[in-house]
Image (cartoon, rainbow, N blue to C red):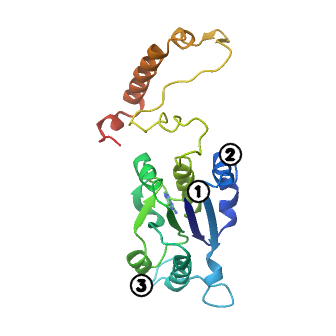
Amino acid sequence: MHIDIITVLPELLESPLSHSIMKRAQDKGLLTVQTHGLRKWAVNEYGQVDDYQYGGGAGMVMMAEPLANAIDELSKERTFDEVIYLTPDGETLTQKIANTLSLKENLLLICGHYKGIDQRIREHYVTREISIGDYVLSGGELAAAVLVDAVGRLLPGVLNDETSALTDSFQDNLLAPPVYTRPAEWRGMKVPDILLSGHTAKIEEWRHEQAVQRTKEKRPDLLEDEAL
Ligand code: 6GU
């Protein structure tokens, strides 16, 4: 998979995408991520990419022309399956959306800043609008990093244990069960016997029960959602 990201702050995306699983995905050639500083397509020598909003009101708006030129130029190199605008008024990112996006070949992400981007870009170029939750961030960059991580780790071969993405929380609308590591007794607290029993089928059954119980307690809403 290849992901292009248009942003006014490419530096903000460097570190989150350069470690751990995202690093492994890129080192293995399973994922390539390219950030593009929008100022390369600025309308003047001052690097201008935003302007005052029509109708008045505080806050700048990202201009259509630099964004359109950036998208057009990148579209010559790749055919994008989705052009995604990260915005708090988009649909809320779920595991289901991450699963769907992980099947695509080329994604273009647009990070908004200030009051957002000119509406005409949303109507003319953007195919999908995604938020990462009901709170406001200073810009779309951290949201883009979250999206790339959620999608990138699902690409075949990225995770060590092939089954491990399937047992994540949310993959079957259930939270993950409790996990333990050594020692078997720590400060008087014991690991449940079943996990030490070596009885694989019973352990799986216990984990499923725990996942259901945990979901009922913490996120009953998930049990009412349609399956992923
Ligand atoms: Cl995608 N962008 C911004 N600026 N804030 C957010 C968001 C995105 N998702 C949640 N809050």
> Where residue 137 sits in the image (x, y, percent)?
54, 59
Q: Place residue 180 in its image quadrant.
A: top right
How would you rate the neighbour count of disc 1 (Cα within 10 Å): few for under 14, some for 14-19, many for 20 or more? some
- Label 3 close to label 2 by CB (< 8 Å): no
- Disc 1 is placed on an element classified as helix
Q: CA distance from mark 3 to mark 2?
A: 46 Å
- Label 1 close to label 3 by CB (< 8 Å): no
The residue at which mark 2 appears reads as 20
State the residue at coordinates (52%, 55%): 147
Q: Is mark 1 within 8 Å of ligand 1?
A: no
Of marks 1 and 2, the one in the foreground: 2
Q: Quadrant of the C terminus?
A: top left
Disc 3 marks a residue whose amino acid type is Gly
Disc 1 marks a residue whose amino acid type is Ala
Q: Place residue 143 in its image quadrant.
A: bottom right
> Where residue 86 sits in the image (x, y, percent)?
49, 64
Q: Which mark is residue 145?
A: 1
